[in-house]
Amino acid sequence: MDVISVGIGEYIVAKNACLLESISLGSCVGIALHDPVTKVSGLAHIMLPDSALSRSSQAPSPKFADVAVAKMLEEMTRLGAVRAKITAKIAGGACMFQSAVPDPSMNIGDRNIEAVKKLLENAKIFLVAEDTGKNYGRTIVFDTTSGKLTIKSAKIGTKEI
């Protein structure tokens, strides 16, 4: 099966069977969306919670959670996914350097997790599993056929959600 890399601030939507991989999720959050019937799936590696934080005059980037979720859902439905059947799994959002973040409101990992959950709730996408927070990085591999999300970490090993 093909392995497709999803870089920081990117997303990929796939209709065919493949593995979508994103490495080095620290405070970033990986969002895996999956229609179990059509198998249309997507994976995003988001860096920031909200495009309102952007100072760029260019079109908002999928590095922002709100942009990535909207673009993935749009592309997935265009490829045949049924919006009501799409589910989500998320991973990441760590606080990698807790001592360097004395003010909890500055923890970008927590802010990313909160934003992603709110966006999914507003879009009526059911969050079926997550591996978020804590203080370690993750690499994720999403199987578009089964919908399984494998999480790898030097600190905790490998697990599947």
Image: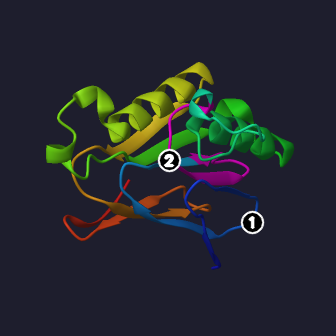
**Which of pointers 1 and 2 lies earlier in the amino acid sequence?**
1
Residue 59: image location, x then y, percent: 78, 40
Measure how far apart labels 1 and 2 are at the Cα level.
Answer: 26 Å
Amino acid type at image mark 1: Asn
What SS does tag 2 mark?
Answer: loop
Residue 70: image location, x then y, percent: 70, 35
Say whether residue 65 is magenta. Answer: no
Residue drawn at x 47%, y 45% is 89
Amino acid type at image mark 2: Met
User: Which disc, if any, is residue 130?
Assistant: none
Q: Vertically, is 116 above or below 140? A: above
Residue 115: image location, x then y, percent: 47, 29
Residue nearest the observer in this picture, 1 or 131: 131
What SS does tag 1 mark?
Answer: loop
Give the residues in magenta: 33-51
User: Which disc, if any, is residue 47?
Assistant: 2
Quarter of the N terminus within the rendering: bottom right
